[in-house]
Image (cartoon, grey):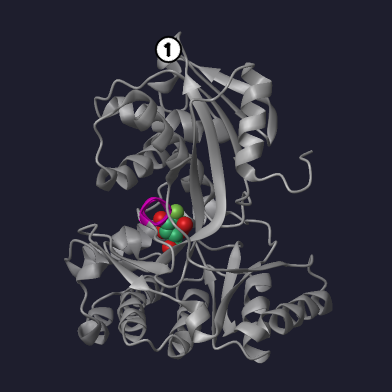
Amino acid sequence: MSAPGTTVADRATAGFRQRYRTEPAGRWAAPGRVNLIGEHTDYNDGFVLPFALPLRTVVAAAPDPDGRWTVWSELDDEPVEFGAAEADEPGGVDGWAAYVAGVVWALRAAGHDVPGARLAVASDVPVGSGLSSSAAIESAVLAALVDLGGLDLPARAWPRLAQRAENDYVGAPTGIMDQSAVIRGREGHALFLDCRTEEVEQIPFDLDAAGLAVLVIDSRAPHRHADGEYAARRRSCEQGAAALGVAALRDVDVAELDAALARLDDDETRRRVRHVVTENQRVLDTVALLRAGRVRDTGPLLTASHASMRDDFEITVPEIDTAVEAALSAGAYGARMTGGGFGGCVLALVDADAADPVAAAVTEAYAKRGFTAPGTLTVRPAGGVTRLA
Ligand code: GAF
């Protein structure tokens, strides 16, 4: 569809011109993300350590004189148009455009005078791979509307607002991690986020200096019941916290974990709680190692996180476990699933010159098991949402 060498920003601009027969007022870009460690901890008021990816979603936009919203995406030839009535009613717009309408809804619900707009969306963030294509489109649209309308909304408030779009308009009960990574990510750094206070520390994560690479493996596993299972995990965590008499599982001290688990009367809740409490500690331990410049040594923590997701939280699938095992057998320092689970991507920490052989080993293990070939790419931490020149 696009000419070779065309960038995602070019595609958004070309789509805008073709659709609206005029020039966009600006272009806003937001990245996807991977999470280095800290899975299903965000909605437990815990800790996460994601970073923004060099893959981006770009929105070209201009004000709409009629005060309506029209959005076109390169993934869907038909533009979607809506007005205030549909935007003000969660469910009034569905499909991918709900992420756009959700942002309009969240801004209006917060009392902002949101300008009507024409938007064209192009993206290099693969949809459905667990790399936060939804947070990317929400955040790029949010940046565009804030700029076009001159809205008074400090950047610190953006992640919560984008999360509300997803929780309350789209109806996905996700936490604050993805929007935070996509909005607050910084090149060369992982984002250490306390999901209770929303305080962040930018942790230097210079893979090149360490001679390392992060290999991202797209499992190509179909998302099996991902939405229902995510909500079920969230409920289990809330039940566990209630049974332990704490506001959130963040409040369970890892040193007191055995005693806490002994107070729970069903094994499934016990395992869910154990994952969250130990995972929070693994984030803290990973941050401590990174602060000390010991990037390689984080490998075993990544692998332990995977085992916990597989055995205690039960959110992995055979393709994902195969990718992790094959990467480790081929010499990765650590490997784990990243994101919500039931498919999506695995990340592996490898020597820079081992990225290709590890990718080949995973591909071979997949072929042996008859799985659809995985996608692989190496990534570095990139910057968060921005207006393009
Ligand atoms: C998804 C959610 F959107 C995040 O909020 C987070 O809970 C993650 O799954 C699991 O860590 O990406």
Q: Which residue is mark 1?
A: 67
Image spot of residue 173 (x, y percent): 40, 48
Looking at the rendered structure, the number of numbered marks drawn on it comes to 1
Please tell me whether residue 176 is drawn above or below residue 67 in the rendered image.
below
Residue furthest front in the image:
389
Q: Secondary structure at mark 1?
A: loop
Task: Specify the quadrant of the image occupied by residue 84.
Answer: top left
Q: Position of residue 60 (x, y in %)?
A: 54, 31
Whether residue 378 is visible here, answered yes or no, is: yes
| 245 left or right of 20 in image | left
Q: Position of residue 175 (x, y in %)?
A: 36, 53
Name the amino acid type tagged 1. Gly
Instruction: Name the quadrant of the N terminus.
Output: top right
Q: Could you tell me what secondary structure mostly forms the magenta stretch? A: helix
Q: Position of residue 102 (x, y in %)?
A: 42, 32
Dot 1: few (<14), some (14–19), or many (≥20) neighbours within 10 Å? some
Please check the rendered image and state whether residue 180 is part of the magenta-colored stretch, yes or no: yes
- Ligand number 1: quarter of image: bottom left
Residue appearing at x 23%, y 79% in the figure: 260
Q: Is residue 113 left or right of residue 80?
A: left
Q: What stretch of residues is rendered in magenta? A: 177-184
